[in-house]
Image (spheres, rainbow, N blue to C red):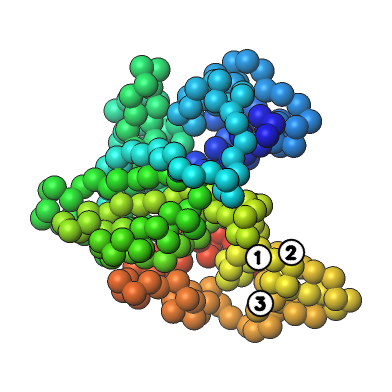
Amino acid sequence: MHIGDRIQTYRLRSGLSQEALAERLGVTRQSVSKWELAQALPDIDKIVLLSKYFNISTDELLFGEPYSPLNTTQQMLHWGLYLIVKNFEKSIDFYEKFFNKRASIVGIGRFAQFWFDNGCLLSIMNERHLPGHDYTGCDHHKFALNLWVKDLIREYHRVKSLNIGHITGIRNPHSNYHFFNLTDPDKNIIEITGEYYEGGNKMQEVMNCQSCYMPMDTADKFGTETDGTPNKDYCCHCWKDGKFTYTSTLEQAVEDNIPWWKSEEESDDVARTRIMEVFPKLKRWAK
């Protein structure tokens, strides 16, 4: 595995786009792309910054061993505690002013981390991404435990077989970010995320439909043009023969998609809020 592969793996695990990582490192998106494609190597100062952002050693970034889910018998867990906040954007602004520094990582409106030279960190998580969680009047319910595993599907089946608490299905709120939640006896949230393998192969970067946000991870999920070629912006449900399969407004599209986004423990309002964090940014609905 080349260092570029490891940069991409840790970037995606952190929920960062190439543009976002480039901004934090003070380089261009093209530089990050060249690193990940093994067309160039980052300078030593960037390697140090990368290791700090990803909370790994420079040795691990430079010389890490390849991982095969088929022959690994033990998963290595990385874990962290997150402060759960109701107003995510306001909290980021508060802590950026308090620490007099920008957040080191802001991942898809879901979590943010502040890294410091002495190794300390603060992690915060957007409560809107924890369905069913409400700490109103419950001061001891302000933390979530986050675990990272090497093979998310295998860990999901292992935890499910334990039958120790409520477990959600594996969710994919953003390209290359998969997770599931486990609830402990006190209704605290344990979020388990990690690399998502299918058929023994790591999933490559997945495109999402720019109308309904459905992941398009196989060729048959792409929409088609009039000549049969795939349209990589829209899925087969939204785009066929060179045009949209239905007419809609943003508001109507949000309501139509609630049943597909809502989990068993969520209300329509919670699902609607989550959809509205995504849909207005999609190509079809962006103004």
Above or below, 83 against 154 in this view is: above
Q: Residue 48's spot in the image, x, y percent?
A: 55, 19
Label 1 near label 2: C-beta < 8 Å?
A: yes
Kindly identify the amino acid type of the residue bearing the numbered disc 2.
Lys
Q: Which residue is mark 1?
A: 216
Residue type beneath disc 3: Cys
Residue carrying label 3: 238
> Dot 1: what SS?
strand
**Image depth: mark 1 or mark 3 in front:** 1
Dots 1, 3 in contact, CB < 8 A: no
The residue to which callout 2 is attached is 232
Residue 91: percent from left, percent from top: 31, 42
Compare marks 2 and 1 and give the one earlier in the sequence: 1
Secondary structure category for the residue under label 2: strand
Q: Earlier in the sequence, mark 2 or mark 3?
A: 2
The secondary structure type at the circle numbered 3 is loop
Residue at the limit of the structure toward the right, as seen here: 227
| Mark nearer the viewer, 2 or 1 | 1
Residue type beneath disc 1: Met
Q: State left or right for residue 252 relative to residue 97.
A: right
**Which badge, 1 or 3, comes first in the chain's sequence?**
1
Compared with 40, 164 (above or below) is below
